[in-house]
Image (cartoon, helix red, strand yellow):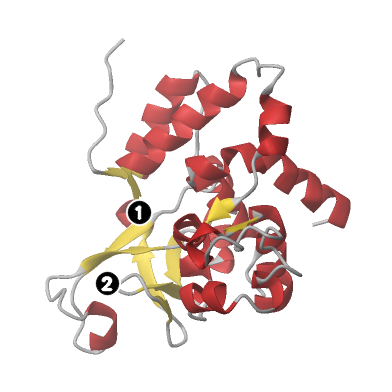
Amino acid sequence: MTIIELPFRATTEQACEWMAQQTGTPWTLARLIENALIPYVWLDYDANHPELFGDANGGYAAPIFYEGDTRRLAEGSSDVLITMTKDAYKIVAKLDAPGFRRELHELRFLKKDLERLAKQLKRDAEPQPAKAESAKESQAGINREQVLAAFGSLVRIDLAQALLDAGGIFGDDGSRVKASAKKGKNKAVWNPVTLALGLNDVYRVPISQLKRAFKAHDFLYEWEGEWNQSLVLLGK
């Protein structure tokens, strides 16, 4: 069997072929999206939208992460419609109606995202050691840098400042682990499940985007079971 080499940005066909080789099961665009992979489309510089590009005057790879846009792709649309993306500086940008349309063949998936998913699926398929549950229970929370890495791009507020202010869902009465900040603000940790549910409830962050966050970061792996259980209990 020929080993498929992934380019830095793989086409849908390349991504599905490579994932099929890694897992032994067929893959489609819909399955890639259902597994929280984010597709990208290259945007050439457009003088009508200079705010998107900044200094990237040659263009940049724009992510397609908005639930309505990805759902449309997963349901078998004949083209790509982008109504929300991130600009060249990774700041969320809502596009003026009707948005940008591109051809399906322009979709790309990042090599690192595909490799991470394949690694995760193989890990999930392995028998879990008996101590895994106790290890998760003993884990206090995630630190400020990890919170920002996982959830910072999903909200329009200054999340770094909100964590420092520790009000509402970010404080001890919310998702911050009680007493974790007694030795200094840099020692504080947050329960990512409680925080994610709060972001959905208070800041209307879509559950689909939060699901992607739990799959995209290794430091959230131990929390994914609790996260999924919470969603079931809440009927989400």
Quadrant containing the N terminus is top left
Q: Position of residue 156 (x, y in %)?
A: 51, 80
Q: Residue at label 1?
A: 107
* Amino acid, disc 1: Leu
Of the numbered discs in the image, which one, if any, rests on residue 143? none
Question: Quick check: 93 left or right of 202?
Answer: left
The residue under the point 87% across, 51% down is 233
Question: Quick check: 199 left or right of 40?
Answer: right
Identify which residue, 221 or 17, lies in the foreground: 221
> Looking at the image, is mark 2 or mark 1 nearer the viewer?
2
Give the residue furthest to the front: 183
The residue under the point 69% across, 72% down is 169
Local secondary structure at mark 2 = loop
Point out the tag, 2 or 1, that comes first from the N-terminus: 2
Relative height, residue 35 to residue 124 (above, below): below
Question: Quick check: 215 left or right of 91?
Answer: right
Relative height, residue 7 to residue 76 (above, below): above
**Would you identify the image quadrant in which residue 2 lies?**
top left
Q: Position of residue 3 (x, y in %)?
A: 27, 17
Of the numbered discs in the image, which one, if any, rests on residue 88? 2
The residue under the point 47% across, 36% down is 117
Quadrant containing the C terminus is bottom right
Identify which residue, 201 or 63, lies in the foreground: 201
The residue under the point 18% across, 76% down is 45
**Would you identify the image quadrant in which residue 93 lies?**
bottom left
Local secondary structure at mark 1 = loop
Q: Position of residue 151 (x, y in %)?
A: 52, 63
